[in-house]
Image: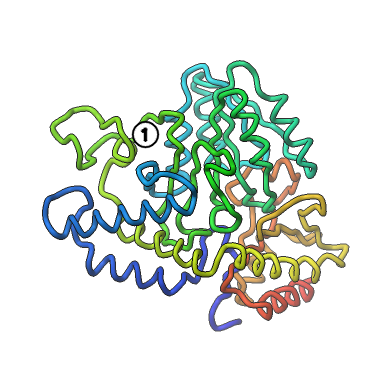
Amino acid sequence: MIDRPVNFDNAATTFPKPDEVKHAVSYAVSNYGGNSGRGGHTLSFRASEMVYKAREVIADFFDAQPENVIFCSSCTHALNTAIKGVLKPGAHVVTSSLEHNSVIRPLVALERQGLITLTIAEVYDDDEKTIEAFRRAINNRTQAIVCTLASNVTGKILPVDALSGICRQKNICLIADGAQACGVIPVSLKKNGINILCTSGHKGLYGIAGTGLLITDGNFPIKPLLHGGTGSGSLELTQPDFLPDSLESGTLNTAGIASVCAGIRFLNRMTPERIIKYENHLTDIFVSQLSHSDRITIYRSPAGLYVPIVSFNIEGMPSEDVSAHLNEKGFCLRAGFHCSALAHRTLNTGTGTVRFAPSVFNRETEVKKLCQEIKNMI
């Protein structure tokens, strides 16, 4: 057993965190004791100043406006806010066959309530076939395409630029789940044509758990999911109608916001290009070490583009058993269905898969030791 477990489950949450993130959280707990936007005293001012600075840093990173950066408790919270806030009764929605439950469950809930109709477009290894599947799924009642930028099961990157082009032509809102893409590959509201980007703060952005972001270009109004105190218009009995206040009811997660800001500064210092190059190098080692075995199935295609995630199975061994054995040896990999029923149905995995997801803090030697342990199991 390795003394310190090696985290290869960074698609769930990155660990370890950069030193600047740890310092930012500690500093926030020690110094930002006020409630941002709630009070005219020094402690409140300090917290408010930090929160606004974080909005600026995040907006700059994603090519957005600071007031259009909404702090949420998770990517799931952001997606529910976007989906339920944009869609009108009678809407038709198109989503992909690789979606996380954070996308498909809100959509299915609305469908079962009779509020929307839903079409699932197949994702293929060939991007042109995927684009055509989305194009065929659209009808004259389609209000939104809601899809992931990269699958949390296989790492498959969807052709977002082409999909956003279709949305612009037809005045359809593009809501993107960036949980596995943000901080890993370049994501820009302007360049990629995304109307509403939802992402977690604790994955590729290196913040702490309990953080999420909704970032909008402002072109599609979003009704609030939550109503309550915002620090503005306190005498009014109705929710404010301007961003970010309309979508930020309740006390903000000050330490969490500070952590995401610090995580993005870490990304800017390291540069996403260097990080993904290194993480792809680790996944290349992993795939090359295991692809020669006829007992191992790796869910990747040479024709596809992927973020640094690899799902695999060993013939005759349930994914949970493989993960449990590797955990005993000190390697943390997630097994099962990864909260992504659609993706596993599309892949026909049966008992799920084991997922390998490295980070910039992993080392080549750790990957090679993991591969050797997998070979020993076979």
Q: How many marks?
A: 1
* Above or below, comparing residue 355 to residue 143 in the picture: below
- Percent position of residue 293, x then y: 86, 66
Taking the spot 72% from the left edge, 34% from the top edge, the residue there is 131
- Percent position of residue 118, x then y: 60, 25
Asked whether 61 or 180 is in front, the reply is 61
- Mark 1: give few (<14), some (14-19) or many (20+) Cα within 10 Å: some
Occupied quadrant, residue 324: bottom right
Asked whether 190 or 174 is in front, the reply is 190
Taking the spot 38% from the left edge, 44% from the top edge, the residue there is 70
Left or right: 229 as drawn, with respect to 75: left
Left or right: 236 as drawn, with respect to 85: left
Give the quarter of the figure containing the C terminus. Answer: bottom right
Dot 1 falls on a residue whose secondary structure is loop
- Tag 1 residue: 225
Occupied quadrant, residue 77: top left
Q: Disc 1 residue type?
A: Leu
Give the quarter of the figure containing the N terminus. Answer: bottom right
Taking the spot 73% from the left edge, 76% from the top edge, the residue there is 373
- Percent position of residue 332, x then y: 59, 69
Q: Colour scheme used in the picture? A: rainbow
Taking the spot 42% from the left edge, 30% from the top edge, the residue there is 85
- Percent position of residue 13, x then y: 51, 61
Left or right: 234 as drawn, with respect to 156: left
